[in-house]
Image (spheres, rainbow, N blue to C red):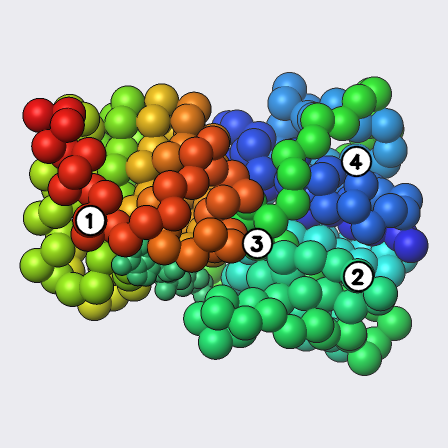
Amino acid sequence: MKLLLVGEYREGRLLDTSAELFGFAAAIGGDASIFLVGSAEDVPAFSGALYLVDAGLYGEYNPEVHKQLLLKAVEEVNPDLIVFIHSSYGWDLAPRVAASLKVAQVSEVIGFADNAYEVGCCNAKMHRNVTPSTSKAVITIQAGAFPALQSEGTPLVKVLSTDVASTTEFLGYEPAEAKDVNLAKAEIVVSAGRGIGKKENIEVIRSLAKAFGGELGASRPVVDAGWIDHGHQVGSTGQTVAPKLYVACGISGSIQHLAGMKKSGFILAINKDKDAPIGEVADVLVVADVLQFVPALTAKLS
Ligand SMILES: Cc1cc2nc3c(=O)[nH]c(=O)nc-3n(C[C@H](O)[C@H](O)[C@H](O)COP(=O)(O)OP(=O)(O)OC[C@H]3O[C@@H](n4cnc5c(N)ncnc54)[C@H](O)[C@@H]3O)c2cc1C
């Protein structure tokens, strides 16, 4: 299978997520090339062809221009599969490319087996297997679903250019609103999941965070339910954290949550289900009712 991996470059820097594209390529097997709107100064180690567009000339993301440039690389590579990370870049550009090529698109792939892509459904509570009905396909892979692999070698760089005109213009990035909590810098994060049961129980988890001298985090359902502000959310649509200690209280361990915390130094999970997926990344899984265990731990620490 021929793969065209679409790397991402932002504000002069190749994003780390490129390594997950290599992880995906290794998992699926096949012959990979890369497409990148970036800079010759910062290309990944790689032993195949790299189709490079100078971001200095074409600027940061512009849907029409990037699509035309990518279609040029597609013409040259003739890939079976075009692979994006499911980032704001990927989810905007992938469907444009799929529509231009009139091929199937599968979003948020988390696995691959027997010629089918595994994707989440029902708010990621269930998985389904999808097989594209066209011989070529475009996919986006969920951040954190495939291991980050460093590739080796020196890429064979082929520079692409276009004279396509665009009706849109990239104006710049705006920093997100400053948050009252900075989970990214915290050494200890104690997070509340849906397993805490109700809004009032946030205080139980907050007390443990305080006793540890850490910050309070949360999974998305806790935020969606309005039990706590979005600034506390950890995960693919929240903050990415890498504290020395991460305590997951009543959190199942969905891929979207793990994407935001699995690089933590030590993970302590408290869950009444001994088979909860969080157990796969946790250093210690305490099988207990969070509302019994957490107050007891807080009392000990205090
Ligand atoms: C596009 C997209 C983006 C998303 N982004 C994020 C994100 O950024 N962050 C995020 O967290 N999620 C995100 N999600 C949602 C994600 O898929 C999961 O639904 C979510 O992470 C589940 O949260 P949870 O673990 O708190 O709840 P659940 O999956 O419902 O798990 C609750 C856990 O609590 C345990 N439990 C229940 N009662 C108790 C008790 N008394 N004591 C101990 N344990 C108990 C249960 O056994 C269970 O394991 C996203 C989903 C989508 C589709």
Q: Looking at the image, tell me whether mark 1 or mark 3 is earlier in sequence order.
A: 3
Question: Which residue position is annotated with label 2?
Answer: 113
Q: Looking at the image, tell me whether mark 2 or mark 3 is earlier in sequence order.
A: 2
Amino acid identity at mark 1: Gln
Q: Residue furthest bottom?
A: 133
* x 23%, y 44%: residue: 293
Amino acid identity at mark 2: Ala
Circle count: 4
Question: Which residue position is annotated with label 4?
Answer: 50
Point out the frontmost of discs 2 and 3. Answer: 2
Spatial separation of the CA atoms under disc 4 and disc 3? 23 Å
Question: Which residue position is annotated with label 3?
Answer: 142
Q: Looking at the image, tell me whether mark 1 or mark 2 is earlier in sequence order.
A: 2
Q: Secondary structure at mark 2?
A: strand
Question: Which residue position is annotated with label 1?
Answer: 292
Amino acid identity at mark 3: Gln
Spatial separation of the CA atoms under disc 4 and disc 1? 55 Å
